[in-house]
Amino acid sequence: TINVKNELLKRLFEANGSPISGQEFADEFGLSRTAIWKYIKEFEEEGYGITSIRKKGYVLTHSPDRVNAANIQKHLKTKMYGHNITYYESCSTTQTIAHDDAQSGAPDGTLIIAEEQTAGKGRLARPWSSAARKGIWMSLIIRPSLMPQQAPQMTLVAAVAIVRAIEEVVKIEATIKWPNDIMIKGKKITGILTELQSDPDRVKAIIIGIGMNINHDMEDFPEEIQSIATSLKLESGETIDRSRLIAEILSFLELYTHMYEKHGFSPIKLLWEGYSNTAGKRIKAVMLNETIEGVALGISEDGLLEVKQDDGSIRGIYSADIIV
Ligand code: BT5
């Protein structure tokens, strides 16, 4: 089933400034010209600029800064990821919506995205600040053929995809802090939250929650995180096209997920090590029941962080907060 309103917007984008005939579009979809005109009015109310040219049709002259399906899909180069998008101006958390949608059979690559989250969450139910129209707040549902124990490494797969996409679109370098943070000059720009729906022997769905600070000025962050958070705009001095960055992330994520499915973790590990800033440093790993100290050696074939403690023993850890 095709969403006619989305299709019309997509055609207006693809026409690149030349007119789309309302009559022809109406005929193609078996609608009246009035129905088309109503969609055009709705677009204008949503912030699009549309000029009507007599006897020729409608021309898109301006599109609002929104991460809706049309804006993302005009940049999209993927096979599956991002072809199905549910968009919210505001929601509590995209992560919960994605879980419900995955449960009811949403296809591989379905994206849930919002301009604003009123109850965004990090790991261990910590709050995640998600200011309206400043960032990328999205949850991707994927259905790779992986064993449940291979799912946590998807956090590392996603981290590499995000750093590569930032490199392409913004031309600046970010680093990965194991397991789920992306940093620029010691401050956090992105957090990843990977969650799993699984049978005992088979992954049903992985929900990859991605929160990225993009066009924030410092005052867009709550005071309590201003010393630890930054945005791509603050670091690059430029306002970023969020939709283009999202499309680029989806491309790399699709590529690396297939690589992981086909060839296992080794190629991902190599990529990951190129962007990580954890190896070789003395760290404290704060876990739920204990805190250990030592030198971070790197990650193992299954994505665990290996820490050499002062007594010489090596520990592999699954998840922790790392203090450098
Ligand atoms: C994370 O948790 O970093 C995972 C964040 C995942 C957010 C995405 S947004 C889309 C999807 N929907 C959701 O509701 N969540 C996902 P963690 O490593 O636990 O880090 C959380 C900590 O980061 C908080 O305790 C704060 O100290 C800090 N923090 C909160 N908001 C931040 C922000 N916007 N930028 C940088 N740091 C932030």
Image: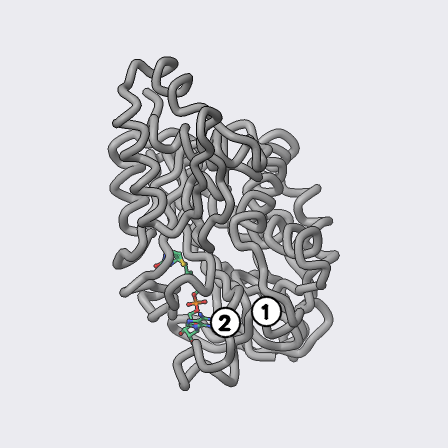
Q: Residue at x 42, y 62 (%)?
A: 133
Q: Residues within 10 Å of mark 1 (few under 14, many from 20)?
A: some
Quick one: label 1 or label 2, which is nearer the N terminus?
2
Q: Quadrant of the C terminus?
A: bottom right
Residue 310 horizontal side relative to residue 132, left or right: right
Going by the numbered disc 2, the residue's amino acid type is His
Q: Quadrant of ligand 1?
A: bottom left
Counting the numbered discs, the total is 2
Whether residue 118 appears in this view of the structure is yes
| Disc 2 Cβ-to-ligand 1 distance below 8 Å | yes
Residue holding disc 1:
233
Where is residue 282? Give x, y as percent: 66, 78
Whether residues under marks 1 and 2 lie with C-beta atoms below 8 angstroms apart, the answer is: yes
Residue 179 horizontal side relative to residue 201, left or right: right
Rounded to the nearest whole Å, what is the CA distance between mark 1 and mark 2? 7 Å
132 and 35: which is toward the camera: 35
Q: Residue at x 38, y 29 (%)?
A: 107
313 and 124: which is toward the camera: 124
Residue holding disc 2:
216
Q: Residue at x 34, y 70 (%)?
A: 126
Q: Residues within 10 Å of mark 2 (few under 14, many from 20)?
A: some
